[in-house]
Amino acid sequence: MKVAIYNNNVSRSVAVAKQIRSLLKQKSAGQITFDADYPDIVLSIGGDGTLLSAFHHYRKQLASIRFIGIHTGHLGFYADWQHTEIPALVDSLLADNGEEVDYPLLAGRIHFRDGREKRVLALNEAVIKRQLGTLSAAVYINGQLFERFRGDGLVVSTPTGSTAYNKSVGGAVVHPTLETMQMAEIASINNRVFRTLGSPIVLSKDDTVRVVNDSRARDVSFHYDNLNILSHDIAWMEFKVAPQKIQFAQYRHMNFWKRIEMSFIGPEGN
Ligand code: NAP
Ligand code: MN
């Protein structure tokens, strides 16, 4: 089994990376090797943001890689192993039987006015918004005009991304076994010209959402996970639940609702 270690440069992450390397060398008797280019397992050490970077770094190899997230800050959603659990994690790696769980991703197509097109894959979400003025866009679902949006922007998220930006704009938390995407508004203006639903929608895996940008403003930006495109040239973008998924090595069962409760409510809430 080939392992890659992908860590942020916080000193605790660097120390954890070193600890894992030496434990694996000591205990694995050559059964586990390190390969940063073509790994079977990627150990992301840092926060959820680090896992997003690791995902984009290895996005072309999603079918053959399983990820593991270790957090060195606060409890993460993707980064759900604590840095104090490293010996147990190393033992799980040595006893690996290919255990995995997979989560849906979002596929996006961004079409520019000059005819260029960029395809992206997102683990958390895709966002279109304007930096200064309001964004004006027409939203189509499966080719039919659904609404005319005016406001700060729109967020289209995956189930595991539902606890990130989506949640901040009032979207629902979605269990990651559901193959869906959710669209939520960021500060929509509602009047006689622009009328939107006003609530988040959860779409099926066969639905396509197209957002057609009406303005030539220079400050329209497109964000996906921790990556950004700033352009005055975006004509439209289209979103679907992706055919690919991300796989995580699942050595122990982590109850999703327990993790939500621990992250957002905590012991004081009970
Ligand atoms: P960041 O600014 O450090 O991330 C913002 C926060 O979101 C961090 O606390 C991050 O956790 C957390 N996070 C990331 N993915 C999450 C998930 N799936 N569920 C719950 N929390 C999550 O930037 P970043 O670390 O590169 O992360 C990029 C993400 O930031 C974007 O994908 C977007 O979801 C989010 N974001 C949120 C807002 C908002 O809520 N208003 C605005 C912009 C971007 P860690 O500290 O563990 O990294
Ligand atoms: Mn972060």
Image (cartoon, rainbow, N blue to C red):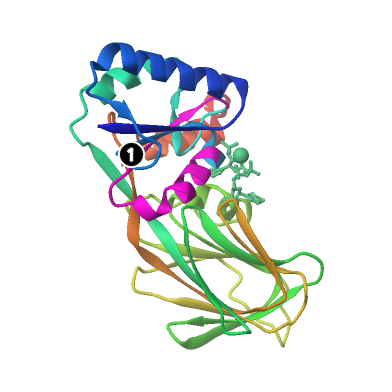
Res 187 seen here: no
Q: In the image, is 38 to the left or to the right of 79?
A: left
User: Which residues make up the magenta segment?
Assistant: 50-73
Q: Quadrant of residue 195?
A: bottom right
Give me the residue at 56% from left, 48% from top: 164
Q: Secondary structure at mark 1?
A: loop
Question: In this picture, is 245 found above or below 222?
Answer: above
Q: Tell me if residue 137 is in the magenta stretch.
A: no
Classed neighbour count for the residue bearing mark 1: other residues with Cα under 10 Å, few (<14), some (14–19), many (≥20): many
Instruction: Pinpoint residue 55: horizontal percent, then vertical percent.
Output: 45, 47
> In which quadrant of the rendered image does the N terminus lie?
top left
Res 251 seen here: yes
Q: Tell me if residue 51 is in the magenta stretch.
A: yes
The image quadrant where one finds ligand 1 is: top right
Give me the residue at 78% from left, 74% from top: 218
Number of marks in picture: 1
Q: Nearer the viewer, residue 158 or 184?
A: 158
Question: In this picture, is 103 found above or below 37?
Answer: below
Instruction: Pinpoint residue 27: horizontal percent, then vertical percent.
Output: 27, 13
Q: Amino acid at mark 1?
A: Pro
Give me the residue at 53% from left, 17% from top: 15
Question: In this picture, is 116 found above or below 81?
Answer: below
Q: Quadrant of residue 216?
A: bottom right
Q: In the image, is 156 to the left or to the right of 174?
A: right
Instruction: Pinpoint residue 18: horizontal percent, then vertical percent.
Output: 47, 18
| Residue linked to disc 1 | 39
Instruction: Pinpoint residue 118: horizontal percent, then vertical percent.
Output: 52, 71
Q: In the image, is 40 to the left or to the right of 171?
A: left
